Each structure stands twice: as C-alpha cells, then as structure tokens.
Amino acid sequence: MNSGNFHPAIEFILNFANEFSDSYLYAYIIQIMLIGYMHKCAGSGRYWKIIFTGSIFGMFGATIEHLGTAWIKTIDKNQSKAYCCYLLAEIGWIITEFSIPYLNLIKLKVLTQSKIVKTVNWVIGFLFILFGLCRFYIGYLRLINKTLYNIKIYHLHGIAFGIIAIADGLLSILIFIELNKSAKRIKEKYGETFNLLNSFKKSSLFILFVVDLMSVILAILSIIIDVTIFGRSVNKLIKPFHALKSNFLLILAVDSFIFKMRASIDGST
C-alpha cells in the first residue's frame, strides 16, 4: 500500500525494483539475456527456437506477476485490480513450463519416425490442454481470492507439476528405449560396444531426466502442503527445487551451446 511519502507512480517503481530480491524474477531475466546471446552466436534450428521462445514467455510470466505484486503493494490490496496480472501471467507460465516436454518430443522425433510418435503427439497435446486449464484455474483463484498462494493453489501447483512430470517421464522413457535400439543396431552392424549409460550421462537427456525428477518432487511436495507444522515446513522445502527448475531452459541452452562448440572445434582439427 502507498505509504504516502511518494507519488504512486514512484512508489510503484520502487516496489517493482524491490521485487528483484525475489530470485524467480531475476532468474528469468538473466535467463533470457544469456539464452538470447547464445541463440544469436550459435543457436539455430527448431530446438533453439523453442528454448528461446520458452525463455521469452518465462520472462513475460515473471515480469507480469511481479508487476502485479508491486501494484498491489502500491494501492489498497482489497480494492486492487492488479490481481488480473496473476491471471495474465499464466500465459507465460504455461508456455515456458511446457516447452521442456516439447523439447523432449523433438528429440524423440529425431530418433524415430515410427507410428507411436503420432500417438505420443496426441497424448502430449491432451496433457498440454490439461496443464493449461490447471494453470488458468490457478490464475483465476489468485484473482478471486486476492492472494498469490494458499493451500488450494499449492495443491493445484502439485497437479500441474504432476502433469509435466507425466509428459516428461513418458517421453524420456521412449527416448531411452529408442537409444537402446540404436545401440543394439550399432553393435550388430559394426560390432562396436556402445555404453548407453555413459552416453546418457554425458548427453542433454540426463539433464532432461533431472528436470523430470524435479517435477515429480515438486508435485509431491506441493500436494502435501497444509496448515500443519509439517505442511509449513514442506512449503519452505519447495523453494530451492522451484528456484532451480526456473532456470532449466538456461541449463539446456548451455548444454546445447557447449555441444555445438565442441563439434565445431572437433570439425576444425
């Protein structure tokens, strides 16, 4: 609420500047800056376009949400229409969160063109609709309840994270199966030993697996949050996992950037 010491516009700017103490806002802004730079220097193709687009919408969601929070702090929170920002921010959260399953889907399509890919496309599309509805409902509850978080909103976050975990998990399993098939074909054709586990650890698939794991952990922790002492403790435990997950597009971008640089160096020697 406006303290009366400054003009409301100045108070709003100061409140928004103070929002940068929240790592979620800073993380998405530094993410788009670094991904944009890497995309310009070495990024090309559909994979990089999705990473870049996802990071843009991540910054959009974070900025709109924190603008809303700054607006609420500037005026009477009970009369504020600023909560509409929370609903609008869901557009950014939906696209940036679901960009990772879509990256997984691209990797699967590179590995195989079998009939199962068409079925998987439909499944992922259905999960995207469920995820979008869940996220918009979160935004709606924030709007009508005039709060960023409550127990019901946390539980809905758990469902949303669970949907992401299902989408990522399904695609990761299929990717691993296709990699295993490729390893067997290499062994049969060339008689070479292909260490699938070592290759998995060194590839971006391992990072995607970690993302899947984070989604599962966040889903479980968000669902068991309640008003008890244990539930409030779980709320604190969520923070590092959520903060880490907010920068996974940046991690994937760095991984892809390093891979491309190594390929360029190897090709020039």
Image (tube, helix red, strand yellow):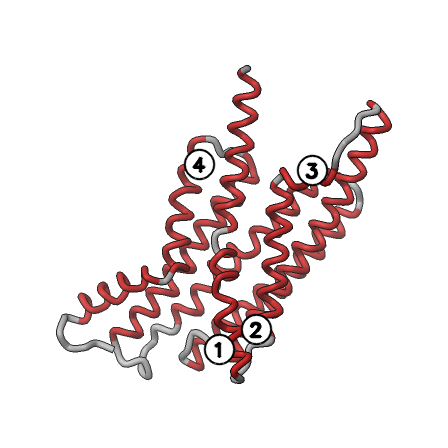
Left or right side of 121 for 242: left
> Element at badge 3?
helix
Q: CA gap, disc 3 to disc 2?
A: 37 Å
Q: Earlier in the sequence, mark 3 or mark 2?
A: 2
Q: 50 and 23: which one is in front? A: 23
The reply to whether the C-beta atoms of the residues labelled 2 and 1 are less than 8 Å apart is yes
Instruction: Please report whichever mark, 4 or 2, sits nearer to the chain's N-terminal start.
Output: 4
Residue highlighted by disc 3: 198
Q: Which residue is mark 1?
A: 141
Is tag 4's residue or tag 1's residue first in the polypeptide sequence?
4
Q: Earlier in the sequence, mark 3 or mark 1?
A: 1
Gap between marks 3 and 4, in whole Å? 27 Å
* Residue 38 badge: 4
Residue underneath mark 2: 156
- Residue type pointed to by label 1: Leu
Neighbours of disc 3 within 10 Å: few (<14), some (14-19), many (20+): few
